[in-house]
Image (spheres, rainbow, N blue to C red):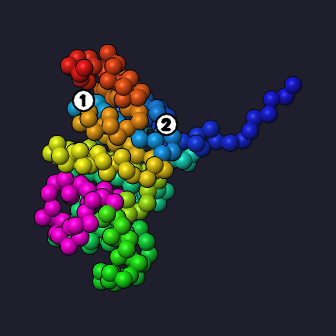
């Protein structure tokens, strides 16, 4: 009997797939042979102690760094050698550890620029009027990230938590298929963290989200699966419950103190 193999890329179903990805800095291996895959719509957290390689891994996915070895695919397409802007065109968006907003512009202006950055609208810098469709989009984004009340406020005058909300809105402006969040809860008060968690849980379920997070409560609430990095390698992967109960994770990351 002749076996017929269907010609279909085996990775087509994955929103993001890393295969054997490594990155060296001289003699230091910051990321070592990392492989994992995210289903479309999946929420995944990457956790690990300081120096585990989380930021390096993020930069490899965004294209800010090139891997020394391995392959990275978005929706089945090999993007390993693509520069960041081409990955953005394929539907990638990211936020940063320190919110990247224009402090002297209003919330509406920041959101408008983010919308314009991804669409070839007219070159005018005039803000849209309330009756323009563009204004409706700005208002909808502001509402999605809980900033409807602050459309005219200067971004620089917002609280740290609100700046994170604004940055999230700016990242969502491109309607990304894959959203990377770099420590979204860093520096937030407990109340702000709770608010952010609610916003993240309300994101379009079709969008794939990968977040690096130090805050266990946020990571475990938002993510369906968690990948644990230690000294550049993946040491565990599973549901938040499995990770919280994993003795190796408790030992290396949680110091045995996590119940
Ligand atoms: N550009 C670089 N040149 C040399 N070494 C680097 C560089 N970037 C990162 N490293 C090293 O790689 C290792 C992993 O760093 P990375 O910042 O990715 O870890 P991390 O898990 O994000 O840590 P943190 O939680 O503290 O942000 C560290 O030992 C770090 O010093």
Is 168 one of the magenta-colored residues?
yes
- Region rendered in magenta: 144-171
Where is mark 1, residue-wise?
A: 49
Image position, residue 155 (x, y; %): 18, 65
Residue 189 percent coordinates (x, y): 15, 45
Is label 1 in a helix, a strand or a loop?
A: loop
- Can you say whether 108 is above or below 42 in the image? below
- Tally the numbered discs: 2
Dot 2 corresponds to which residue? 37
Residue 161 falls left or right of residue 244:
left
* Distance (Cα) linking label 1 and label 2: 22 Å
72 lies above or below 241? below
Place of residue 10 in the rendered image (x, y in percent of width and height, measured from the top left): 62, 38
Residue at x 28% of width, y 30% of height? 48
The residue sitting at 20% across, 73% down in the picture is 152
- Height in image: 23 above or below 113? above
Q: Is residue 135 left or right of residue 251?
A: right
Q: Which numbered disc flags the more N-terminal residue, 1 or 2?
A: 2
User: Badge 1, how many Cα within 10 Å: few under 14, some, many 20+?
Assistant: some
Within 10 Å of disc 2 (Cα), the crowding (few <14, some 14-19, many 20+) is: some
- Does label 1 point to a residue whose CB lies under 8 Å from ligand 1? yes
Residue farthest along the right direction in this orientation: 1
Seen from the viewer's position, the closer of residues 27 and 178 is 178
Asked whether the viewer can see residue 135, the reply is yes
**Residue at screen point 17% across, 42% down:** 190
Does residue 56 appear anywhere in the picture?
A: no
Dominant SS of magenta comes to: helix
């Amino acid at each position: 009997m002749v076996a017929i193999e269907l010609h279909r890329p085996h990775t087509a179903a994955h929103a993001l797939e890393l295969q054997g990805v490594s990155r060296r800095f001289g003699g230091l291996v910051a990321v070592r042979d990392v492989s994992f895959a995210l289903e479309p719509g999946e929420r995944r957290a990457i956790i690990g102690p300081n120096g585990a390689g989380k930021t390096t891994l993020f930069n490899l996915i965004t294209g800010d760094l090139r891997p020394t070895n391995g392959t990275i695919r978005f929706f089945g397409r090999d993007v390993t050698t693509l520069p960041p802007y081409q990955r953005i065109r394929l539907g990638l968006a990211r936020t940063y550890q320190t919110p990247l907003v224009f402090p002297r512009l209003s919330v509406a202006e920041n959101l408008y620029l983010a919308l314009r950055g991804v669409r070839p609208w007219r070159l005018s810098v005039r803000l849209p009027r309330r009756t323009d469709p563009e204004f409706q989009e700005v208002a909808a984004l502001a509402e999605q990230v809980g900033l409807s009340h602050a459309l005219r406020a200067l971004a620089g005058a917002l609280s740290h938590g609100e700046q994170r909300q604004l940055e999230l809105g700016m990242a969502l402006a491109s309607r990304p298929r894959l959203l990377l969040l770099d420590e979204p809860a860093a520096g937030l008060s407990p109340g702000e963290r709770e608010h952010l968690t609610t916003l993240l849980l309300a994101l379009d379920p079709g969008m794939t989200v990968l977040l690096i997070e130090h805050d266990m409560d946020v990571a475990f609430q938002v993510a369906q699966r968690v990948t644990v990095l230690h000294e550049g390698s993946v040491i565990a992967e599973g549901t938040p419950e499995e990770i919280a109960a994993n003795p190796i994770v408790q030992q290396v990351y949680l110091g045995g103190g996590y119940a």
